Image (cartoon, rainbow, N blue to C red):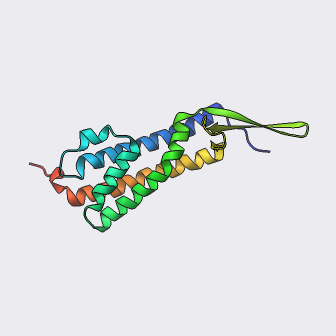
Amino acid sequence: MKEAHSLEDWEIQVGRFVLAFGDIEHTITLCLRTIPRDEIGEASAKLPLQARLELLDELLAKSEGDLRSKLSSTIKRVRKFVARRNLVAHNGLQFQVYKSGDSLRIIPAIVSSRDSSKLLAFPGLVELADDTKNLSVDLTEAAMDVVRDERSDLFEVD
């Protein structure tokens, strides 16, 4: 029999996911403020996430290099997480009820209010939180490598 998870267990995992994705969004905004030599940071910060990802990808494609390539491939990984981010960010915990003969099975899940076939059960949420945290670390490292390599002027001390 499956172990039941309390509401607090769900809240902890959602919190882990939201904090990790917040780090990702913050890193994307910092990249747009620091990597380009032109000032686009303030205007770009107001763009939706998908538009910020596209803009950063375009900026990175303007010149070649292993560090830029690594950051660009990490951004592509971020894009794959956006739909799942929206599922968690815009929907609450619901109970899916399944009937088989005389028995009922109730499974808690985060379910899309627009498409009930899109859902996330507890094990998937734990995996998503872990994967998002790892992606956040990878993105931050890739971004800092590019910034250190291309914008050493930001680190000069008088």
Q: Where in the figure is residue 92, as x and y percent of width and height?
A: 59, 32
Task: Work out whether residue 18 or residue 57 is closer to the camera in this orientation and state it.
Answer: 57
Name the side, left or right, on which 118 lies relative to 66. Answer: right
Task: Work out whether residue 34 or residue 38 is closer to the camera in this orientation and state it.
Answer: 38
Q: Where in the figure is residue 63, as x and y percent of width and height?
A: 25, 64
On screen, residue 37 above or below 90: below
Q: Where in the figure is residue 40, as x and y percent of width and height?
A: 23, 44
Name the side, left or right, on which 157 lies relative to 56. Answer: left
Task: Work out whether residue 29 or residue 57 is closer to the camera in this orientation and state it.
Answer: 57
**Could you tell me which residue is drawn at 80 percent across and 45 percent down?**
1
**Could you tell me which residue is drawn at 63 percent across and 43 percent down?**
118
**Could you tell me which residue is drawn at 36 percent across and 63 percent down?**
70
Which residue appears farthest toward the front when viewing the image?
114
| Total residue callouts | 0
**Could you tell me which residue is drawn at 31 percent across and 68 percent down?**
66
Which residue appears farthest toward the left when viewing the image?
158
Name the side, left or right, on which 53 lies relative to 4. Answer: left
Task: Work out whether residue 30 or residue 60 is closer to the camera in this orientation and state it.
Answer: 60
